[in-house]
Image: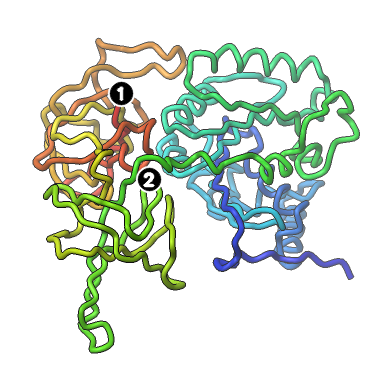
Amino acid sequence: MWAKIYITLDINEQKELLRFTTAGSVDDGKSTLIGRLLYDSKSIFEDQYETIVATSEKRGEDYVNLALLTDGLKAEREQGITIDVAYRYFATPQRKFIIADTPGHIQYTRNMVTGASTANLAIILIDARNSVVEQTRRHTFIASLLNIPHVVICVNKMDLVDYSEEAFNKVKADFTEFASKLNTKDIRFIPISALKGDNVVDRSEQMDWYDGPTLLYLLETIHIGSDHNHIDVRFPVQYVIRPYSDEYHDYRGYAGRIAGGVLKPGDDVMALPSGFTTKIKSIDTYDGPVDEAFSPMSVTLRLEDEIDISRGDMIIRPNNQPEDGQDLDMMVCWLNEKPLIPKGKYAIRHTSKDARCIIKEVKYKINVNTLHRDEEDLTIGLNDIGRISIRSTQRLFYDTYRRNRITGSLILIDEATNETVGACMVI
């Protein structure tokens, strides 16, 4: 009897983790592509497959709708669209993967920002019949704004254009012309049919003119080791660990996730904002002490000297300090139906630090179709992207977003509702 093997994610496996997001316009086949990827890589249960077979038959479809693997909401299945961000996990012998399937509708652009904020790679689907459309440009711009290092353009539905090389080359030329205005450096193009499975996991027999990798092979082999900043040491402190037990009576550790750089016992470090310097005594992890730690590991640092350090402080190298100030220039993606209020007050969260701020100025809004700056209409509403400046109530230690995606980002929070209303990237 036919069976599928479900591959679990073992946190103890020393496999590299690749986070990627899918984006594209409505009905470009994002959910179908992920379903095909999971199905052909043998990463689903047999009963899951039987369920979507039955659901497809019930809906009157003459094929197995693999999009049902990711469209979990009832409204998504009824309309055949993605509304919320769907996360899926799978693994191959080479790598572990976390997929964020993001919506294509314009009113769910904020969800695309959420799903793409931690991605190493973005898959942008383009319908081979329609070439580059507004949402393609919008999602590509957001991928560039979020500094996603790698972008893969999947020209989908090649089966509907008779697997034409000319149609593929037209899409490639149209996209390249638009992307030349952006900062995205690594762009790859793959002609696929998510419905038929061409060039997703297995190489297509219909497109012998394409000699590049399949999508899964590219995901397994693309180099992501240099995506993290391993030069500038940044360690935002999340929690001070004091066990208060006889066994660990004098233990004092500073827990957090490394935002940049490489740390080793014996290294000279400085605590901000105090400016006091000391050395690293040891580095502890869940699995025990380590001789070296780097981004994005979660660790506990023990220091040789007793220094007053608390949540929100940052540990760095004395000769490599971040920017320091209360006035910041940022790009903002607005996530709330209530527009940004000029001169309004908001709570902010930057790394592990909480503070408040005032919106000093709205400088311009971006037209995502032309990438032009609109300095006349300064209303930043839902799904809009613009440039603002703020003044915070406390000193922040930050880098530009392009230098470090963690220390260069923050969120704006409506103090009345506690909703996250803006995602910001420091310029």
Residue, disc 1: 386
Q: Which colour scheme is used?
A: rainbow
Q: Position of residue 66 (x, y in %)?
A: 71, 50
Q: Which of marks 1 and 2 is nearer the N terminus?
A: 2
Please rate how many residues cluster around mark 1, counting C-alpha atoms within 10 Å: few if below 14, some from 14 to 19, many from 20: many
Question: Residue 157 shows which numbered tag?
Answer: none
Q: Which residue is drawn at 38% across and 11% down?
A: 372
Tag 1, which secondary structure? strand
Q: Position of residue 410 (x, y in %)?
A: 28, 41
Vertical placement of residue 310 versus 32, above or below:
below
Vertical placement of residue 273 versus 43, above or below:
above
209 left or right, relative to 154: right
Residue at the limit of the structure toward the left, as seen here: 393
Q: Residue at x 24, y 79 (%)?
A: 243
Residue at the limit of the structure toward the front, as seen here: 266
345 left or right, relative to 153: left
Quarter holding the C terminus?
top left
Q: Nearer the viewer's eye, disc 1 or disc 2? A: 2
Identity of the amino acid at label 2? Gly
379 left or right, relative to 150: left
Where on the picture, by quarter, is residue 248?
Answer: bottom left
Identity of the amino acid at label 1? Gly
Q: Where is residue 192 in the image (x, y as percent from the top left)?
A: 76, 33
Tag 2, which secondary structure? loop
Quarter holding the N terminus?
bottom right
Q: Which residue is drawn at 82% across and 26% down?
A: 210
Vertical placement of residue 189 versus 285, above or below:
above
Q: Position of residue 294 (x, y in %)?
A: 43, 52
36 left or right, relative to 142: right
Residue, disc 2: 260
